[in-house]
Amino acid sequence: MKTLAIYNLKGGVGKTASAVNLAYLAAQYGWNTLLWDLDPQAAATWYLGLEPGVQDSVKKLARGKRDWTDSVQATAWPRLSCLPADFDHRHLDQYLRKAEHPAFQVRKLLKDFQSAFDLVVLDCPPSFSTVTENLFHAADLIAVPIIPSQLSLRSYEQMVRFLEGEKIRRVKLYPFLSMVDNRRKQHRDAGIALRDEIPNLLATAVPYAAAVEAMGRHRAPLPVHQPRARATAAFEQLWLEIAEKLHREA
């Protein structure tokens, strides 16, 4: 089983849309996939047509109880399941800090899913926290959506410095350009500059598109309601790039 985290310290960069679409595409390509929604806003849960999870699920997670796996819900699409968030996830940090080895709880709990899933996608809240440390230790690969701007580069560099400072070397970071509007000169110029400054930047750039924003109205992944959209093709190409990286890490 592989674990893919979608994370950025900065919000508003297309993180949750990327998590939902990549998880859906992984399932379409034959991977039994679990999307674990770790964000208390539960946007990924909403996009998949599900409702927030049961109360106290966060306490069960942090205390190491095994019956919380019963909270996994099937979606409308084959091979794609979801562990929904709920508003109680806002307390996840404090619960994790009380656990033994708090930075490794998610990594430990993921072992319960090894027999059922080929891939777990973590949709992570935009913050530096105990939850963040957990994903750094749990993920095989972190895909980092960044919009073409210096602020995005700055937040990415902060993440790199954190990993170096904590000597966390097992996880691989792969940023990709997100919400790109090539009509804007700033985006075109910044995109070129970022490709020079970030050597491991993935080749695929996801365009800014109204179709992505419409996911909330349809409560479905982009390929379901806009299969021929340019952004759909970009997400599929992005998934193929990431899948190749995951196989390489095997």
Image (cartoon, rainbow, N blue to C red):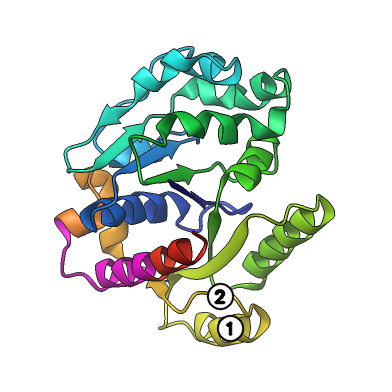
Q: In this view, does 236 lie to the left or right of 124?
A: left
168 is higher (above) or lower (below) than 149? above
Residue tagged by mark 2?
Answer: 201
Q: Farthest residue toward the right? A: 165
Q: Where is residue 154 in the image (x, y as percent from the top left)?
A: 71, 66
Q: Which of 19 and 106 is in front in this view?
A: 106
Q: Where is residue 198 in the image (x, y as percent from the top left)?
A: 64, 77
Q: In this view, does 215 lie to the left or right of 92?
A: left
63 is higher (above) or lower (below) than 17? above
Magenta highlight range: 225-240
Structural distance between the alpha carbons of marks 1 and 2: 6 Å
Q: CB under 8 Å between callouts 1 and 2?
A: yes
Residue lying at 30% horizontally and 42% vertically, measured from the top left:
47
> What secondary structure is found at the residue carrying circle 2?
loop
Residue lying at 55% horizontally and 41% vertically, measured from the top left:
125
Residue lying at 22% horizontally and 46% vertically, measured from the top left:
220
Q: Position of residue 41 (x, y in %)?
A: 46, 34
Residue lying at 65% horizontally and 19% vertically, measured from the top left:
95
Q: In which quarter of the image is residue 191?
A: bottom right
Identify the amino acid type marked 1: Arg
Name the chief secondary structure element in magenta.
helix
Residue tagged by mark 1?
Answer: 195
Q: In this view, does 249 lie to the left or right of 164?
A: left
Please tell me how many numbered marks the rendered image carries. Answer: 2
